[in-house]
Amino acid sequence: MQTHDIRKHFLDHFIKAGHTEVPSASLLLDDPNLLFVNAGMVPFKPYFLGEQTPPYDRATSVQKCVRTLDIDEVGITTRHNTFFQMAGNFSFGDYFKREAITFAWTLLTNSVSDGGYGIDPQKLWPTVYLDDDEAEAIWRDEIGVPAERIQRRGLKDNYWSMGVPGPCGPCSEIFYDRGPDYGVEGGPEADEDRYIEIWNLVFMQNVRGPGGGKDNYEILGPLPKKNIDTGMGVERVACILQGVDNVYETDLLKPIIDLAAELTGRAYGAGSHADDVRFRVIADHARTSAMLIGDGVLPGNDGRGYVLRRLLRRVVRSMRLLGAGDNQATMGTIIGKVIDLMAPSYPELETRRADIVKVAVGEETSFAKTLAAGSKLFADAATATKKSASTTITGADAFTLHDTYGFPIDLTLEMAAEAGLEVDQEGFTALMAEQKQRAKADATARKTGHADLSVYRDFLDRGPTEFTGFDELVSEARVLGLVADGARVPVATAGQELTVVLNRTPLYAESGGQMADVGTITTGSGVRLSVTDVQKVGKSVWLHKVRVDEGEIEEGDEVLAAVDTAWRHGATQGHSGTHMVHAALREVLGPGATQAGSLNRPGYLRFDFNASGPVTESQRREIEEISNAAVEANYQVNTFETGLDEAKAMGAMALFGENYGDVVRVVEIGGPFSMELCGGTHVVSSSQIGPITLIGESSVGSGVRRVEAYVGMDSFRFLSKERALLAGLASSLKVPSEEVPGRVEQLVTKLRDAEKELARVRAEQAQAAVSGLLDTATTVGSTLVVEGRVPGLDANGLRSVVTDLRGRVADRQAVIALFSPSGDGPDAKVPFVIATTAAARDAGIKAGDLVKEVAPLVGGRGGGKPDLAQGSGTEPGGIDAALSRIREFVG
């Protein structure tokens, strides 16, 4: 059975059993504990945590997941994958153990013609938690599994939680026996290579407390409702149903390996473990990369972007190690194959095919440059190793190549072997372990996102805050609760800062790139609170951050919540202006200029978008002109709610990767000009936005650009300031305003010519000084010391002179040390450069050591290599002492 059919059988089985099918969420859900969705239940966490009321009692999904903790193990074994699909069925206070076990068993063992997978029941082994007599009885007495095939296991294996305080419960796992060829008999307790887990049924019934690890926490008590959360590994079931040993031989990964073999000329499974590892890395990482890019991740240097960059670069590196040429571009072909294979289940990949391939190919091109730079750095490290009479490149050097320059360790190992060297792998591994430990500690420290919500649980259970701000700016409301320092309080007095929860509010809570409203909460008795921020908890309850200015506020008070009208007007200008700029960008740059992030506040907007290169000046002008033409057209701004599919059919733009509900809000400006899914506040007509002035365009990461703009009065003030600046320049230059650019260009040309002439004169002076320095050089012991002051040179000029002098005495044991003092007092600077000849280095005299000796004497610091080093100080008076120290050192 093909993987796509396995998915379909699963969903059909549970839909038939009354479950609502829920499409896979994006891999990028907004979760404080996760980089990526890593389990099928993650999108349902708000329901399990009580933050939101589920719209159904039963649900089923096949969720795409990414786990990258074991990224370095991928390919080495066949057990590790970064991307996988988790099929699950969920009950929110509906059915429990008996139904969950029965649903799983019938799907696994029913014949294919009856909608099952047709797995031999004799090969299935359930496990249950140590004291879960109920689950064991169901397996034994109702399902009919012999008692000897049911095993009890402890907290680590058969008790599940999210790793943070919250819902938890015992679980029952289902294992498949692959037979004696794969290990010893005795069930999962004896061998989890032979007996592989294919399904985990979690009986979510308790609440856990804080603690680390899988078993270091306290069970606090029962949940209000008993829930079911299960996860079946689609890829593992595919291995069984397709009769293959591991996931890399299944229908969605083996074709990628076959393609890589065709492109490189190497064969998979031909006896080379190293080659097989590389093929598996290519298949796994290419698939994960395509899925991440499809959900909006772009290569970067931190967070999600860094993970993607690392995955893509491991693909490129593996292809090269398998024989792909340095100039052979393969990423586009491989990612295209991934899309062909995965699109039947994830059609959005086909929709975004061009963008996904473009990002991957761009990273391949970028990495080619990194490899070239890394090869040079490796060559330097290898040369230094050999000169130190060692045959082992240090772990620190290997780690620096890997961590700072993105140079893979196995490529370092291979190049070291070619150079007749080894690598201190233990040292490298130790440094990697330290880095992982730091990352793990950081991740543990971040896992507090759900623990802090307990104080708001009562409000979440009551239902969502009624947001009235689309229709009114002042609303009557009731105080549901006051929270100060993480705890509920009955009353708050003047001077206190706290959080207020209302039953209804016109104040917009920060979301969708729009900053929160500010405003006031008042009562008829003179109580006044200033609202400084508004946030959401559980995406449903508004939290008003306030300062009590006057009076005393109590829970239950009737109040008036009011938005600062000037703030709201500016905010709507900024948000509507963002839509205008987005539409103009797509018109000028093409449909690929899709949103990658935004921020808008009164009078200002910032918009990030996908792009392959900078926006030209002419394109900038065109974007600005199109935006302002739409403003002048005074388009009506219409908002309405509709179904997600209907909105997309109308052409509404959706932020890819955003988790939209079934009902969405559409903001339409000027009919086809702009139509986007958006929950923000907007102007009534486009002319209310006022002028839009682009003030900047820049890069914020690989493949992502940013434009910034002012709108309304802020735009006018900016233009007025620019006009005043231009008028001032025109007055100073004594030319009309329109002639200022030409006049400035003339002055810049003259300045550059003067700088070139000054540089020429300094070079002549330096050359004259060179000859004099050689004439006054002294010999200390066996070493010629060429030393002195050469004023007026910067570090580059000084380095050039030192290099020239070293060339003139290259046949001798010599040290060249030059200082170039300039300025007085606090403005004093003393750049210096020291070089050594080969004979001096053979005698143990290294430039880097000399710089460390003399730098403190001139009030500075420096460093470098044995042949050339440099530094800078601020104390010219120390030069004589520094020169004296050099002579002592070489003597």
Image: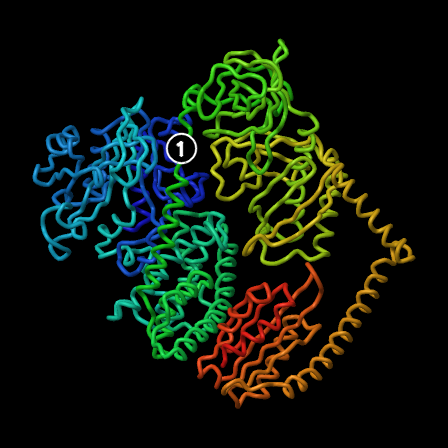
State whether residue 472 appears in this view.
no
Where is residue 548? Give x, y as percent: 59, 20
State the residue at coordinates (75%, 47%): 625
Pointer 1: residues within 10 angstroms few (<14), some, or many (20+)? some
Tell me which corner region of the image, top left, top right, bottom left or bottom right, holds residue 277: bottom left
Q: Is residue 711 visible?
A: yes
433, above or below 468, in the image: below
Judging depth in this view, the residue of 252 and 233 nearest the camera is 233
Left or right of 271? Residue 525 is right
Above or below 50: residue 84: below
Q: Position of 479 compared to 173: left or right?
A: right
Which residue is situated farthest in the top direction here? Answer: 525
What residue sits 39% from the left and 41% below the top? 445
* Corner quadrant of residue 640: top right
- Residue under pointer 1: 450
Q: Which residue is at the front of the view, 492 or 858?
A: 858
Amino acid type of the residue tagged 1 in the rendering: His
Residue at the location (11% across, 37% down)?
145
Q: Is mark 1 on a helix, strand or loop?
A: loop
